[in-house]
Image (tube, grey):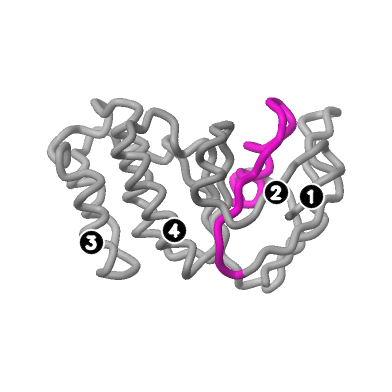
Amino acid sequence: MITISNISYSYGSHVVLKSLSLSLPETGITHLIGKNGVGKTTFLRFLGGMLKTRADIEPESARLVFIDRECLTLDFLTVKEFLSMFTLVDDCYKSTVQALVSSYENTYVHALSLGQSSRLVFALLAYIDADVLLLDEPFNGLDDEGRAMAYSFLEELGRSKHIIFSTHEKDVRNNIANYRLHLVDPQRLVFC
């Protein structure tokens, strides 16, 4: 179990998150839901350490990683060059990575379409050794084939770590999520 408490964050005087707490199973897939503007992206970025603030995390050694298309900053590299900078967490993911990006591995990252960059983000997940992966709208731009590969890969990853993702796409939560996390307002988070 991973427990995070005292989650609070403000932009100036605007309170986005206030004294929230959360306990997560070590494995599984959680769909983060909430209205537009309620703070889902801020919540994920906060948990992933992208925003400067504090929370209490138990165990302290838990590794929570936020990843989205903005991490693809080395856009002067080809997809193949980009991925070669990292080491696979497990060789069993090699065929999945190949399936996700093989058709455009020689394309420069800056030239990728939205769907192709989303596939690259999913491929990158195979290189991240984390206890919890945090994904914000990861299915944007994916066609049916890409979406099916992403679902399958998340299900595989969810057997060994916990994944939290946000999306407004209703079919996604019914297909792959084991849990729901509803950010109702800055002070109320419901896990079910």
Image side of residue 173 versus residue 153, left or right: right
Instruction: Tell me the quarter of the image containing the C terminus.
Output: bottom right
- Which residue lies at the image location 21% right of the left edge and 54% below the top edge? 84
What residue does disc 1 label? 190
Residue 173 x/y as whole percent: 56, 44
Question: Which amino acid type is marked by label 3?
Answer: Lys
- Residue that numbered label 4 is attached to: 155
Q: Secondary structure at mark 1?
A: strand
- Mark 2 vs 3, N-terminal side: 3
The residue at the point 58 percent across, 32 percent down is: 168
Mark 3, residue position: 94
Residue 181 numbered mark, or none? 2
Separation of residues labelled 4 and 3 (CA atoms): 16 Å
* First to last magenta residue range: 26-50
Tell me whether circle 2 and circle 4 mark residues in contact (CB < 8 Å): no
Say which of 166 and 39 sits in front: 166
Image depth: mark 2 or mark 3 in front: 2
Image point (59%, 45%), residue name: 50
Q: Secondary structure at mark 2?
A: strand
Q: Earlier in the sequence, mark 4 or mark 3?
A: 3
Q: From the viewer's perspective, is residue 73 above or below residue 130?
A: above
- Which of the two discs, 3 and 1, sits closer to the camera? 1
* CA separation in Å, label 3 and label 1: 36 Å
